[in-house]
Amino acid sequence: MTARHDEMPDVQRDGYVISTDPAHLDRPLIHGFLSRDSYWAQDIPYDVVMHALDHSLCFGLYAPAGQIGLARVVTDYATVAYLADVFVLPEHRGRGLSKWLMETVVAHPALQGFRRFLLNTRDAHGLYQQTGFTPLAKPEWAMERFDPDVYRRR
């Protein structure tokens, strides 16, 4: 079996591990957090989350007892990346794990040299600024098709 170009060795710190191995993802936990506890993906169907995970570079954050966080990157591995679904479960917050997770994401060898690395956030600007994210340089160039109720209509 050949290695995928987006794999990286697990990174460890203080008993926590960050892994890009999709086999380690706790898919029910991820869906549960996104569909019930996130502000950005309320009511997202299980099959939509599974499809998103299968087509993204996922960084799972793990404690000895199991998965406690995630960062998901959608990319062409050449010019652009989009960061999505970043979370750490509430009982593990306040330990610098989100910052460590983001440092690991932006340092990943397959995510270097892009013209644009994008994300949307309502309230975590300070976290993302620590790893080089800034407001849009040309917001007048950005457009979107936004459908906030898409999951509720399914």
Image (spheres, helix red, strand yellow):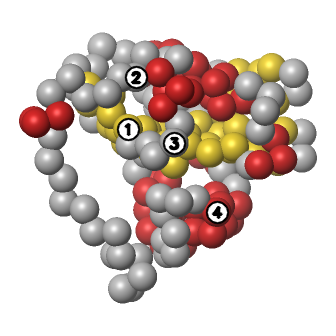
Q: How many other residues sit within 10 Å of disc 2, few (<14), some (14-19) or many (≥20)?
A: some
Query: Which badge, 3 or 4, comes first in the chain's sequence?
Result: 4
Nearer the N terminus, badge 2 or badge 4? 4
Give me the C-alpha separation between circle 3 and circle 4. Answer: 15 Å
The answer to whether 151 appears left or right of 63 in the picture is: left
In front: label 3 or label 4: 3
Q: Is residue 113 left or right of residue 99?
A: left
The residue pinned by badge 3 equals: 123
Q: Amino acid at mark 4?
A: Asp
Secondary structure, mark 3, is: loop
Mark 1: amino acid: Leu
Residue 73 image offset from top left, x and y in percent:
43, 39
- Secondary structure, mark 1, is strand
Work out whether 6 lies above or below 82.
above
Label at residue 133: 2
Asked if marks 1 and 2 touch (Cβ < 8 Å), the reply is yes
Q: Could you tell which of marks 1 and 4 lies nearer the N-terminus?
A: 4
Q: Quadrant of the N terminus?
A: top right
What residue is shown with label 4? 37
User: Mark 2 falls on what kind of element?
Assistant: loop
The kind of residue tagged 3 is Asp
